[in-house]
């Protein structure tokens, strides 16, 4: 198995979840952009 970068799998799973959320919640484009900018900020604050 290729070990690759440690965050590559987590990033892929996050991206798939993000795409699912867009489709599931029927978000408009400005909420999608807002989610890209704001959500990682709050996630980083919660994890640290």
Image (tube, rainbow, N blue to C red):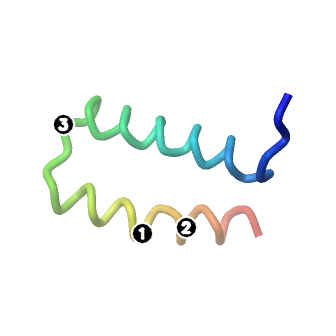
Distance from Cα at disc 2 to Cα at disc 3: 22 Å
For numbered disc 1, what is the local secondary structure?
helix
Q: Residue furthest left?
A: 28
Q: Position of residue 34 (x, y in %)?
A: 30, 66
For numbered disc 2, what is the local secondary structure?
helix
Q: Residue furthest front?
A: 2
Distance from Cα at disc 1 to Cα at disc 3: 18 Å
Dot 2 and dot 1 residues touching (CB under 8 Å): yes
- Left or right of 8 in this view: 39: left
User: Mark 1 = which residue?
Assistant: 38
For numbered disc 3, what is the local secondary structure?
loop
Image quarter of the N terminus: top right
User: Mark 3 = which residue?
Assistant: 26
Q: Quadrant of residue 14?
A: top right
- Left or right of 28 in this view: 25: right
Q: Position of residue 12 (x, y in %)?
A: 57, 42
- Depth order, front residue of 39/6: 6
What residue is shown at x 67% (from left), y 64% (from top)?
46
Image quarter of the C terminus: bottom right
Q: Quadrant of residue 26?
A: top left
Distance from Cα at disc 2 to Cα at disc 1: 7 Å
- Of mark 1 and mark 3, the one earlier in the sequence is 3
Compared to 27, does 37 lie above or below?
below
Q: Position of residue 10 (x, y in %)?
A: 67, 45
Q: Position of residue 32 (x, y in %)?
A: 26, 55
User: Mark 2 = which residue?
Assistant: 42
What residue is shown at x 85% (from left), y 41% (from top)?
3
- Depth order, front residue of 18/9: 9
- Of mark 2 and mark 3, the one earlier in the sequence is 3
């Amino acid at each position: 198995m290729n070990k690759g970068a440690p965050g590559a799998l987590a990033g892929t799973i996050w991206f798939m979840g993000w795409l699912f959320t867009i489709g599931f919640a029927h978000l408009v484009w400005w909420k999608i952009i807002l989610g890209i900018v704001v959500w990682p900020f709050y996630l980083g604050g919660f994890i640290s």
